[in-house]
Amino acid sequence: MKVVGVSRFGGPEALRVFEVREPHAGPGEVRIRVGAATVNPGDAVLRAGELDLGASRPPYIPGMEAAGVVDEIGPGTVTGLRVGDAAMAFVMPLRPEGGAYSEFLVLPADWVAPAPAGAGHAEAATLPMNGLTARLAVDVLGLSPGQVLAVTGAAGSVGGYAVQMAKADGLRVIADAAPADAGLVRSLGAEVTVARGADVADRFRQAAPDGVDGLVDAAVIGSARLAAAVRDGGGIAVVRGEGAQAADPGELARRQVAYHPVWVPQYLGDQARLDRLRAQAEDGTLTLRVAGRFPAEEAAAAHRMLAAGGIRGRLVLVF
């Protein structure tokens, strides 16, 4: 079968097509004939060799989410899915079999859920990992209806989902946006938009003088720059590691501001939450946004576009 990955780590040009042995579903597993897989920042980190891949062997295959059609169900597997069903999946590329840039995926059944009715494979592929990341970021803050959430990176996939989920949860949302994106971000559910940038905390504080109750940092600006926007006793959820951009733990403790690094594998295998995303996409709560489609053979071009920034939605590889 065809996969896209790297045998040597490097830039986008390191990605190429490999032929590997076709896998089959065993007990507790289902196989998906992949129609589309998304391109995410974590894929670039794997491609560049910045992750510990443990026992994996080349080719190293990126990809954290995919959608397609169930074409095998392993013996004794308990699942509501049937052969021929459209499905979506959250995939961990650190496993020995690699990630989602693959013509076929064999996965534990609870990593897979029905795709939203009416969605194409490209659209459905944008939901599992990005949606669960946003869901976890909102969940860890533990806010109640009527409280105020700030979101950075609100025009992107994770940030946009976070805005929509928070709105559906009854929260008031303040979000950052470039001038060209302000209308989009308001359409997703933000009551107030402020200009993005390194000093966005000041603008969040102007919009919420007492401080926001929680903040989802989908742009990874860093808690050091954003803590001032949050009231004492509030919280910050950062969707990827921030390193030197992290606030002084002592300062956060003094102000009782909770810091939550968001590690989406915490929700891996949580089929109930994955299926809730499906339902919210079907009822219009969540908007599936595809920023561009590339044949799988052109993965390098997709990675270059991702690195250039400014993507509104997700780039998708089509198999």
Image: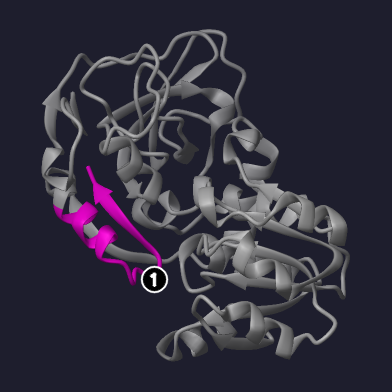
Q: Identity of the amino acid at label 1?
A: Arg
Can you say which quadrant of the picture contains the N terminus?
Answer: top left
Residue 91 vertical position relative to residue 170 in the rendered view, above or below: above
Percent x, y of residue 89: 48, 38
Kindly tell me whether residue 285 is visible in this rendering: no
Can you say which quadrant of the picture contains the C terminus?
Answer: top left
Q: Nearer the viewer, residue 248 or 259?
A: 248
Q: Residue at x 30, y 54 (%)?
A: 316
Please state if 135 lies on the left or on the right of 240 as rendered: right
- The crowd level at tag 1 (other Cα within 10 Å; few <14, some 14-19, many 20+) is some
Q: Residue at x 25, y 32 (%)?
A: 103
Q: Nearer the viewer, residue 31 or 148?
A: 148
Q: Is residue 108 magenta?
A: no
Q: Is residue 306 magenta?
A: yes
Please state if 3 lies on the left or on the right of 52 as rendered: left
Q: Nearer the viewer, residue 236 or 187?
A: 236
Please state if 85 lies on the left or on the right of 191 as rendered: left
Residue 18 vertical position relative to residue 161 in the rendered view, above or below: above
Percent x, y of residue 59: 21, 23
Please state if 83 lies on the left or on the right of 102 as rendered: right
Percent x, y of residue 259: 73, 52
- Helix, strand or loop at label 1? It is loop
> Which residue is label 1 attached to?
312
Q: Which residues are magenta?
A: 301-319
Q: Quadrant of residue 190?
A: bottom right
Kindly tell me whether residue 110 is visible in this rendering: yes
Q: Residue at x 62, y 62 (%)?
A: 224
Percent x, y of residue 49: 29, 32
